[in-house]
Image (tube, grey):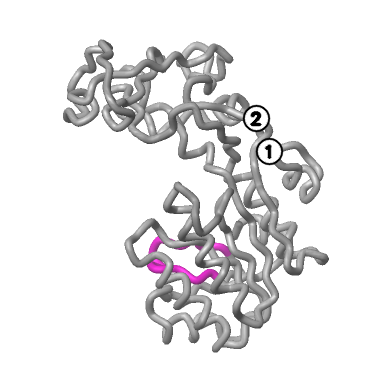
């Protein structure tokens, strides 16, 4: 893992959990109808 | 990227394959061109100082297309290139995409262009899409670890590099904050999208691996070569 996101943007990179929380549409195709 | 730059009152030129699918933002120049068509790239890049080069989709001639675009950039008078590469880019990399990126990097190194490489990890945006509709993950991941990064973070990094100074000749590894395996990725669910429970994967049979995606895996494992194994998330819902 690298520090590039933090050093170049000033904030820590997003975790996968955070991504899923912010983007529920990303896995909608995996959920039952 | 385009929205970010527009919000910073920049006026980038978007080089696209199909301008009908491009963002319609004010003050944005949109030019159609193709990496494999040097004349179109020379026209598109005329007068451009810095070229952010995004790789084309995977293709047998991917490196050739990239090399053609780089050569066109040189011919057009581009001075600086920022290339979105891949973690572990190396000539002997097992992952073929990484070798493609290394050869592209090498082509850029052999020009007079000022360059910066962003070696990005796999995009977490794509991770849910590696799971098939039958719940199978088909791929040679094994116990390998990776640190997926969001495309939002990559875009912010790219903007910082494009508009900042001190990045000449630098290669950045751009990763997320976690070392994951396919066995232990947070599993999404309707009730709790980011429950930190591990996803349990198990081997399935060769027959399952090659069955149509509508087939239901048996979950029974037989001893076999690594090539006969597929990995199935026990639960993704």
Look at mark 1 in the image and give the residue it sits on. A1
User: Can you tell which quarter of the image residue B147 is in?
Assistant: top right
Quarter of the image with the N terminus of chain B is bottom right
Could you tell me which residue is drawn at 64 percent across and 66 percent down? B82
Say whether residue B23 is visible: no
- Residue A16 at x, y percent in the picture: 59, 29
Q: Residue at x 76, y 42 (%)?
A: A3
Label 2 packing within 10 angstroms: few (<14), some (14-19), many (20+): some
Q: What's the mark number on residue B111?
A: none
Asked if residue B206 lies left or right of residue B123, the reply is left
**Image height check: is B235 above or below B139?**
above
SS assignment at label 2: loop
Chain ID at mark 1: A
- x, y percent for residue B9: 72, 65
State whether residue B41 is above or below residue B199: below
* Residue wearing tag 2: B178
The chain ID associated with circle 2 is B
Q: Quadrant of residue B211?
A: top left
Question: Is residue B194 covered in magenta?
Answer: no
* Along the viewing direction, whichever of B75 and B226 lies nearer the viewer: B226
| Helix, strand or loop at mark 1 | loop
Q: Residue at x 67, y 81 (%)?
A: B79
Do the residues at discs 1 and 2 belong to one chain?
Answer: no
Mark 1–mark 2 CB contact (< 8 Å) = yes
Residue A21: x and y in percent read 57, 25
Q: Which residues are magenta?
A: B14-25
């Amino acid at each position: 893992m690298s520090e590039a996101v933090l050093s170049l943007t000033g904030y820590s990179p997003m975790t996968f959990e955070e991504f899923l929380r912010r983007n529920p549409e990303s896995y909608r195709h995996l959920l039952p109808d | 990227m385009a929205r970010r730059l527009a919000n910073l009152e920049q006026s980038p030129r978007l080089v696209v394959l199909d301008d009908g699918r491009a963002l319609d933002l004010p003050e944005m120049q949109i030019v159609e061109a193709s990496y494999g068509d040097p004349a179109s790239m020379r026209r598109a890049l005329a007068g451009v100082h810095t070229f952010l080069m995004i790789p084309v989709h995977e293709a047998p001639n991917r490196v050739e297309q990239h090399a053609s675009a780089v050569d066109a950039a040189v011919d057009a008078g581009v001075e600086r290139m920022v290339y979105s590469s891949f973690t572990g880019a190396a000539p002997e990399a097992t992952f073929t995409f990484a070798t493609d990126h290394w050869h592209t990097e090498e082509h850029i190194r052999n020009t007079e262009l000022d360059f910066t490489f962003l070696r990005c990890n796999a995009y977490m945006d794509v991770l849910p899409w590696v799971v098939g509709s039958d719940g199978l993950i088909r791929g040679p991941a094994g116990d390998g670890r990776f640190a997926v990064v969001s495309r939002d973070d990559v875009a912010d990094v790219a903007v910082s590099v494009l508009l900042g100074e001190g990045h000449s000749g630098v290669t950045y590894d751009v990763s997320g904050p976690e070392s994951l395996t396919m066995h232990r990725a947070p599993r999404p669910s309707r009730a709790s999208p980011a429950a930190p429970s591990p996803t349990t994967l198990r081997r399935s049979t060769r027959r399952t691996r090659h069955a149509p995606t509508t087939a239901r895996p048996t979950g029974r494992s037989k001893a076999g070569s690594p090539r006969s194994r597929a990995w199935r998330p026990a639960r993704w819902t």
